[in-house]
């Protein structure tokens, strides 16, 4: 399909998934307008196709023909189907595609919790994050003409701050020690890859995948926040610069179809340890729970450190688990064996149904 016309991408600078999609659209050279949208405005949006969306989440992408989708993962797959050979971000090879989707999922659903924890845990972070996000929403509003008074601004910020802090438990990121460990592990993994020679600058190849854009979306939020931004600038400056570079890769020279350089890069190797010991056990524990129930899972890292993670059942994460299981089971046995060797024993969670039948 050729791209005739302009897309419209609705989102927010404070949304990791919106930043993920904006950078991906720039890289793919798909023309679009960037329009700020608060998710709470979706039910009253003038576009009936947007009002009818079941999930009130951003980003939302409107195609030139009027079709709309939200959920960054769904949007990326739809764009891949429409423009399969134009600076694509999903490999054609099934096992490579699975690895990319696995890491994209990890960043979207697990690394995001580390960002949310850092953004809303300390008083300093709460104060700064609430102020910058509310100010940004006002200054980027497509319709606002007059800025609120200082007192109104203070009230808006206080209400938003309280609402976001109250969601820390709901999101499942109350344990500061756990999420600080995740934050540092991922940042250190990317830093190691970027600071040494003979390594590609993206996770898997000389060109980015959807997993790179997912990682970028979360790291972008860290860079905008108080503590996260300080940590990146002072301890991981290479990663901070990578974030700036990822923002607009429209000028990156790309030739031919996507090809893996290697799956054994320093960053991928370390991040897969977290997928193996944290994310897959969590997904499996969440999958056997239902609405209103609590998920509790013991996580044992490679160095023997353990965490007991608790959070409310996540229906979306259950769907993620089922999608990963389906993708993994579609691989040939030899491909599954190769993936399991890379990731670790945590991959057995994706074959639990098959093992139970033996």
Image: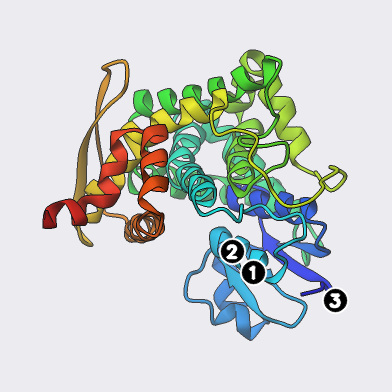
Q: Is residue 7 visible?
A: yes
Residue 340 pos. (x, y %):
36, 39
Residue 334 pos. (x, y %):
39, 46
Residue 197 pos. (x, y %):
71, 15
Q: On the picture, is 222 further left or further right than 323?
A: right
Tags 2 and 3 in contact by the CB under 8 Å rule? no
- Tell me which corner region of the image, top left, top right, bottom left or bottom right, holds residue 106: top left
Vertical placement of residue 67 versus 177, above or below: below
Calculate the distance from the C-alpha at mark 3 to the C-alpha at mark 1: 16 Å
Q: Is residue 174 visible?
A: no
Identify the residue position indicated by label 2 in the image.
77
The one nearer the camera, 5 or 225, is 5
Question: Considering the numbered disc 2 on the image, is that residue within a helix, a strand or a loop?
Answer: helix
Residue 180 pos. (x, y %):
43, 24
Can you tell which mark lies on residue 4?
3
Q: Residue furthest front?
A: 334
Identify the residue position indicated by label 1 in the image.
81
């Amino acid at each position: 399909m050729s791209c005739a016309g302009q897309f419209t991408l609705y989102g927010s600078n404070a949304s990791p998934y919106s930043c993920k999609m904006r950078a991906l659209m720039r890289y793919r050279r798909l023309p679009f307008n960037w329009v700020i949208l608060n998710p709470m405005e979706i039910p009253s949006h003038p576009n009936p196709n947007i009002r009818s969306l079941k999930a009130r989440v951003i980003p939302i992408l409107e195609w030139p023909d009027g079709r709309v989708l939200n959920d960054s993962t769904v949007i990326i797959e739809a764009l891949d189907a429409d423009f399969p050979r134009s600076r694509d971000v999903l490999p054609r090879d099934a096992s490579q595609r699975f690895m990319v989707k696995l890491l994209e999922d990890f960043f979207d659903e697990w690394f995001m919790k580390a960002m949310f924890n850092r953004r809303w845990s300390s008083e300093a972070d709460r104060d700064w994050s609430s102020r910058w996000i509310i100010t940004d929403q006002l200054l980027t509003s497509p319709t606002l003409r007059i800025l609120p008074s200082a007192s109104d601004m203070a009230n808006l910020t206080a209400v938003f701050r309280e609402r976001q802090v109250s969601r820390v438990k709901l999101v499942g990121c109350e344990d500061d020690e756990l999420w600080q460990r995740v934050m540092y592990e991922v940042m250190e993994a990317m830093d190691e890859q970027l600071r040494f020679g003979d390594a590609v600058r993206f996770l898997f190849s000389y060109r980015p995948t959807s997993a790179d854009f997912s990682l970028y979306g979360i790291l972008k939020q860290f860079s905008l926040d108080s503590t996260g931004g300080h940590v990146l600038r002072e301890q991981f400056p290479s990663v901070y610069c990578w974030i700036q570079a990822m923002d607009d890769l429209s000028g990156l020279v790309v030739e031919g179809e996507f090809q893996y350089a290697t799956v054994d890069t320093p960053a991928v190797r370390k991040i897969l340890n977290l997928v193996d010991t944290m994310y897959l056990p969590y997904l499996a524990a969440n999958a056997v729970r239902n609405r209103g129930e609590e998920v509790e899972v013991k996580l044992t890292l490679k160095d023997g450190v353990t965490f007991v993670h608790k959070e409310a059942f996540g229906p979306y994460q259950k769907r993620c688990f089922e999608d990963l299981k389906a993708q993994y089971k579609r691989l040939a046995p030899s491909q599954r064996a190769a993936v399991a060797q890379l990731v670790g024993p945590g991959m057995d969670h994706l074959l639990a149904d098959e093992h139970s039948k033996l």
